[in-house]
Amino acid sequence: MDSSPEVKPDPRRALPSVDRVVRALEAGWPSLPVWAAREAARAALTAERERLETSAGTEVPALELLLADAAERAAELARLRPAPVLNATGIVLHTNLGRAPLAAGAAEAVARVARGYTDLELDLGSGQRGERTAPVVEKLRLLAGVPDALAVNNNAAALLLVLATLARGREVIVSRGELVEIGGSFRVPEIMASAGVRLVEVGTTNRTHLSDYGRAIGPDSALLLKVHRSNFSLRGFVAEVALPELAALGRERGLPLVEDLGSGSLVDLSARGFPEETFAPSRLRRGADVVCFSGDKLLGGPQAGIVLTAHTEHAEAMRRNPLSRALRLDKLALAALDWTLAAVLDGRAEREIPVLRRLLEPEEGLERRARALAGRIREFAGPLGPAAERDTTYAGGGALPDFTLPTWAVALRPADGATRLAARLRRADPPVLARIRDDAVLLDLRSVDPGEEESLVTALRGLLR
Ligand SMILES: *Cc1c(COP(=O)(O)O)cnc(C)c1O
């Protein structure tokens, strides 16, 4: 035969059809859902066609390789998400990992109301319609010693509602040092624009004085806004106005002072070394008229935005704003929030709320756990040189950028590099998220509950067998 390379048939023609790949997936991987098998077959064949197009001379892969690729794609498509992972990064409030884990009791409260009907908007005594957030508002008032409060979908929603209610069409005065961006999609100037308020920037990036605010106040001013710098810090030649002074200026000129705290606690942690501003009620005592913060940062509850107000009229005006309907909490989050607030009222917060338990765990306890865990890992992963090491970490998640915590970790030093091991750990069962420091993978126990250590060992054992 005298066939020349020029007339060689297009290798793409030799690829199997989508139907054939789907049938083979159904036979070999019967647990894959049909929709995922079909979509994955299409995607695997498209990828293969593109590969053959761009790299001339390559061969059509064996059917088994194509099927393995398609099966992996299908399994990924069919995987339910979000799925649990082990957070061994040491960052207790990790935005990418869903921030605060719920307390076991809060999760049970969610499960109790999830599957049936509830008295969400019904007063069982009178049979009349009730307000869905009334129970959590009651607890917030008791906990914070304030006359009124609101709970909405998240803190961005809380700030939006505060601004749109108290300042729509008017001016809001903010320091240039506080025009922050949090987590990419939350930017203070953009939230202000969507609330329909006009931003008046005062001071400079590093220094803002009381006189800057004073000069900016005019007939169109509606309120003074203070925003917590949750994810960065200013050092060096800096000045900002303390809350009581700003509040005094507001009172003198008839403007309410609103503080977006970002991360607020309802347990006073200042005696435990945490900054004063983390205790939300103290911000109202120091002069703020309205404070808002997230439910799933230091509070340790579900995603929510909490608003505490020193004046009932402010809360009432917000409740009347039609936006509050669009920003309302669903029954699952309300059940978790109500449980969390009850735990704080009962004095069970530190014992039962995971965020507090982990942030407050003493260093000695972490050291003991790290040494024991390193010993267990050495039994099956000796070559990685598991060793307990002291380090420092952060609370994280848009909370307390200057505040470091001592911690203990198990360090692993793989010969082929920390990045590769960290990537393999992300695909373990369950997935493990670790921290890399220099050439070591750190399994930081600050963010790992003692009850999770067993599955951490299981995941490692499965991976390193
Ligand atoms: C985290 C944070 C927000 C956003 O809160 P979400 O609950 O994520 O909407 C807003 N402002 C500040 C200062 C924050 O730290």
Image: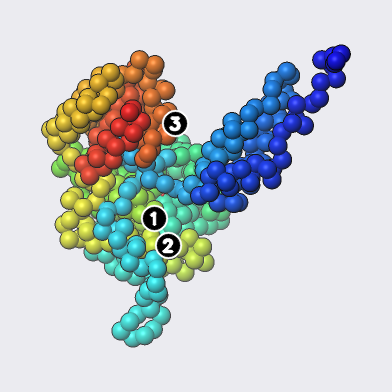
Query: Residue at position x 36%, y 75% from top?
Result: 119
Judging depth in this view, the residue of 205 and 105 nearest the camera is 105
Residue positioned most to the front: 1
Q: Which three-letter amino acid code belongs to the residue tagged 2? A: Leu
Mark 3 is surrounded, within 10 Å at the Cα level, by few (under 14), some (14 to 19) or many (20 or more) other residues, namely some
Mark 1 is surrounded, within 10 Å at the Cα level, by few (under 14), some (14 to 19) or many (20 or more) other residues, namely many
Q: x, y percentage for residue 416?
A: 39, 16
Residue position for label 2: 329
Residue 293 vertical position relative to residue 452 in the rendered view, above or below: below
Residue position for label 3: 205
Distance from disc 3 to disc 2, alpha carbons, whole Å, reads 35 Å
Distance from disc 2 to disc 1, alpha carbons, whole Å, reads 7 Å
- Precedes in sequence: disc 3 or disc 2: 3
Q: Which three-letter amino acid code belongs to the residue tagged 1? A: Ala
Q: x, y percentage for residue 431?
A: 38, 37
Query: Residue at position x 17%, y 56% from top?
Result: 348
Residue position for label 1: 304
Q: Is residue 68 visible?
A: yes
SS at circle 1? loop
Cβ of mark 1 under 8 Å from ligand 1: the answer is yes
- Precedes in sequence: disc 3 or disc 1: 3
Q: Quadrant of the N terminus?
A: top right
